[in-house]
Amino acid sequence: MSLRWSGPAVAGAVIVALMAALAVAGPIVWGEAAERIDAGAILQGASAEHPLGTDNLGRDLLARVLVAGRFSLALALAATLIGAAAGIVLGTLPSVLPKRGARLATGTVNALVAFPGLLLAMFTAVVTGLGARGAVLGIGAAIAPGFARLTQTLAASVAGADYVSAARMLGVPRRRILSRHVLPNIAEPLILNLTQALGGALLGLAGMSFLGLGVQPPSFDWGRLLFDGFSRIYVTPEVALGPAAAVALAGIGFNLLGDALARAAARTTVRKMDEPPAPPPEPGEPDPGAVLDVRDLTVTFPGGSTPVRGLSLAVAPGEVVGLVGESGSGKSLTAAAVGGLVPYPGKVTYGRLHLGGRDVAELSDKELGTALAMVFQDPLAALNPALKIGGQLAEVAVVHEGATRAAARRRAVDRLGQVHLPEPERRAAQHPHELSGGMRQRAVIAMGLMGTPRLIVADEPTTALDVTVQRQILRLLREVVAETGAATLFISHDIAVVGELCDRVVVMYAGRVVEELPADRLADGAAHPYSRALIASLPDLDTDRTRPLAGIPGTQPAPDQVGPGCAFAPRCSLATERCVTQRPELVAHGPLQRVACWEVS
Ligand SMILES: Nc1ncnc2c1ncn2[C@@H]1O[C@H](COP(=O)(O)OP(=O)(O)OP(=O)(O)O)[C@@H](O)[C@H]1O
């Protein structure tokens, strides 16, 4: 998780740190002043001696606000922990109980979520007894349903993962699946939610004390001070405003920090490894001015699955690089890692991941949004069905560049024309379902062109389209690259399409690059046995259609089953014993070509 130190994040961290310091030092420094009774200074307003006035025993209210910080924060922490613990237990019940029990637990959570939080808190506080204990339990009860729902949703999303299904098939008991596979993988968002819940609890407790349901004298927290001062609000407002400001400030601090942490976690977990000194450029390596420069990219999922393992590639301006390989070789995850879109709980590490010479982790969402255009296989999924095409495109310019609605709309229509969508004005006013598949893909490409893309990542952009439309879209992509000079990473399992469209081809197998070569040398220059097998499996005009396709025997190893040697060895006719135990590095093989196979290099 990489926390971006934006203004609100810094403000949140500073306020929370101040609150923590106040909780520790407050009673030590101002404890005595807060209890000192002064019969000669009863119910005073602000003065130089008492900036926030005094209470009905002449005690200094500023000192009392500063001292009350510890009690207020301790109560909020207790309420949050109680609420979170109860919520997490309730939220995991559906995963451990048998079907009927699970349904009951889900129903209970649903009912509690629908119940107004404040009523739940007041009801619990009244039942468990007035005072600090009742208020803490009440606020805990109000927080618990939210945590239960979050836990339930997160647990359900992890429950669908392959490693959980595998554990289930192996007969691992439910409780063990929960503790070993589910809880560790959902811990992060739950912990993040605690910070925000703490802010909410603080406000809730102040509210309870203010209603007279919380802390009772002689104890006092911010809410109690607010309650006491409120009756004087028209005469000496400062006596109520002091504690109110303290509550608001602490609440805002926790919320800002929690929000910043949650945003950091929502972005893909990127951990940058210590960057090794860049190796001297090898033959076949693109020039240092590459738009996309990836070194040692690895994507791992919990349970030992590593679908992308130490991948390096670079794309120069105006260059179209094709990334090919069988299904499951890690192509899409490589693209997702570039755009910071690897799904949770995937972890991305790299030696270098530069876009336009800058680390992608350092780019703001706005910078990434304008420099990178992503085109996916399913254009319908990339477009919001509820919005009109023109509005969606315009949003990019409004959000990223602060353009006016009218200017953004004009640009949207212009870009729709640029991708040769007929009648762009009319299409802009239509919803995605009113367009054909090819038109939708054009609209998605136009959306990428709303910024000034330096890199276009197209992941199987034509797979869902029929052959004629496929050709049109490929031609359009070429045209866009020629016009914008953008570097393009084109992902496809279809080596014929890649050969036709791209300048250079990168062949992937089981998460690694096995060969890199100019596209025009694919047909007769491919060296790696896997690349050759991929090409041989293509039918051409001379292929005898009565015979089965020259497929590659065997299957690619699963991402958690890759051994120490060459992953292709079990399917390779040239493999020797050495290939099973040792892995060949990618080395130069003639000009502009690199191959990871010592049997051919
Ligand atoms: N969210 C995920 N959780 C766990 N494993 C995943 C996840 N997404 C992908 N994988 C694993 O990573 C492997 C590579 O996936 P990826 O989608 O990158 O392959 P691909 O080469 O693009 O294949 P395809 O052409 O089928 O999309 C998959 O086989 C899968 O086992």
Image: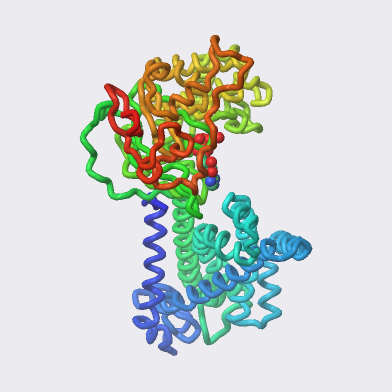
Looking at the image, what colour scheme do you see? rainbow
Percent across and percent down for residue 166 are 60, 53
Looking at the rendered structure, the number of numbered marks drawn on it comes to: 0
> Which residue sits furthest right?
100
In the displayed structure, does residue 136 sit left or right of residue 34? right
Percent across and percent down for residue 496 are 49, 19
20 vs 33, nearest the viewer: 20
> Which residue sits furthest front?
577
Look at the image and tell me whether residue 545 can be seen.
yes
371 vs 70, nearest the viewer: 371
User: Quarter holding the C terminus?
Assistant: top left
Task: Look at 54% across and 32% down and name the residue there.
Answer: 553
96 vs 85, nearest the viewer: 96
Position above or below: 225 against 490: below
Task: Look at 38% across and 46% down and name the residue there.
Answer: 581
Percent across and percent down for residue 252 are 47, 60
> Which residue sits furthest top?
541
Residue 592: image quadrant is top left
Position above or below: 480 against 277: above
Look at the image and tell me whether residue 405 can be seen.
no
Percent across and percent down for residue 565 are 39, 44
Residue 103: image quadrant is bottom right
Residue 177: image quadrant is bottom right
In the displayed structure, does residue 83 sit left or right of residue 573? right
Task: Look at 37% across and 25% down and name the residue there.
Answer: 527
Position above or below: 119 against 28: above
140 vs 514, nearest the viewer: 514
Task: Look at 48% across and 28% down and name the residue there.
Answer: 491
